[in-house]
Image: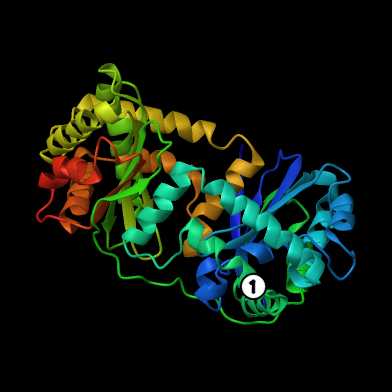
Amino acid sequence: MKHTVEEIRLSNGARGLLIDVPDATVMNFEFQFRAGNRFTRSKDIYETAHIMEHMAFGANAKYKDEHEFEAEFTKNGAYHNAFTSDVSMVYAAECADFEWERILQLQELSICSPRFNETELKAEKGNVKSELTGYLDSHLHLLWIKMQQLLGEDILTMSERLKTIPNITLDDIEEHYKRTHTSNNMRFAIAGRMHGRKSAIKRYLEGWNLPKGERFSVPVDKLHSAKPTLIKRKESSNIKFGWSMILPKVLSDEEYVAMSHLNHILTGTMHSYIFGTARKRGLAYGMFSTTAKYPYFSSWDFGGEVNHETAAQVFDIMYDQLKKVLSGDVKKSDLEMAKSYMLGRYQMNAQTVGMILSYYTGYYFPTDKVYKYDDIPERIKKVKFSDMIEVARQFIDADTWSLAMVGSGEHAKPADLAKIIQPLYKKEL
């Protein structure tokens, strides 16, 4: 969908994006605070942010409880949600174009004048406990959270988080809210039809009753390699693995796009170098590789599910294909195919207002930077063979990595699989 984007800075310190989508029939909103798990006052009450997020659409200055507020919010089909990560707490909503003002005002009630109470706290502590207990059966959740912890991020695992729930009081919820929900700590993005509305939106948001506060800095951890680790699950009939590499810098836009192309060449299709080879030999049903950049580091991750008896063969393929890539053995035709694929995805990934909003917030909330969607084709066309190889070598040369897996531990061992890929690096784990 055609659109334009403008960053606005409010007099109260908040900043955000107004994304004009002239043909939109809906409006999407996201409001972000650096108020996630890492900003709780103490690890003993680690789930405070998560529980507060669950209470976000509960009692407020106008509605006595969650049910009354929910009935009003959704009466014309509008949708709302909130989610918490290590760093962020985000309030999201989508509504029909005709009721955007009403929904914006209801969001103001949730964000600016909640009325936290013991009844809803007790209920949401139970709901969060149920949610986290469910994640204990999700092997991929267990795997990647453990990987973060292994590499040095100061976070808790699901089982550790569960133990903090009984410690949390209403005072903890209110303290976390007051400290984190300030105008300087708020970023927002609103997407939809903006003609004749920008001034009204700006006026609404500048009138929100939030203290000024400060924009919190993202916590910086000392990241390091870690020994191969098994998360033992006796009931696991296969192996789910994660191999993560850390680069102690934030990739440039050009480097990030180059790695997106390389990941496609390695695992993106059934004719890719790693996944395609494994699939052709009947060794793996699904695999992936992805690159991400964070406020102070970047990661290159590989993962998948394999049978116990084929795991070593899959790791042999990963080692062989990465060694070839690092030596510069990539076909020019494969890069051109990756570019063609990326250009197609570019056209497909902006089909809805929500998709457009998600693209911009993915960059803007962590960095305060605007990366225009229309610039993507030019970035894709500029990717060179040497760009991909150079960034891949940087990840290997950084020599900060680990391997973790979920399995029964009766057959393939993490240490044995790590030995297969170890020769890519300078030193042993």
> Quick one: quadrant of the N terminus?
top right
When the figure is inspected, residue 127 is found, relative to residue 173, above or below; the finding is above
When the figure is inspected, residue 363 is found, relative to residue 345, above or below; the finding is below
Residue 127 percent location from the top left of the image: 69, 55
Q: Is mark 1 on a helix, strand or loop?
A: loop
Q: How crowded is mark 1: few (under 14 residues within 10 Å), some or many (20 or more)?
A: some
Q: Name which residue type carries label 1.
A: Ile
Q: In this figure, which residue is indicated by the disc labeled 1?
A: 168
Image color mode: rainbow
Residue 375 percent location from the top left of the image: 45, 45
> Quick one: quadrant of the C terminus?
bottom left
In front of the other: 343 or 113: 113
- Residue 13 position by quadrant: bottom right
- Residue 406 position by quadrant: top left
Q: Can residue 263 be seen in this view?
A: yes
In front of the other: 103 or 60: 60
Q: Can residue 15 be seen in this view?
A: no
Name the residue: 62% across, 82% down: 213
Horizontally, is 328 left or right of 135 in the view? left
Residue 202 percent location from the top left of the image: 73, 66
Horizontally, is 294 left or right of 46 in the view? left
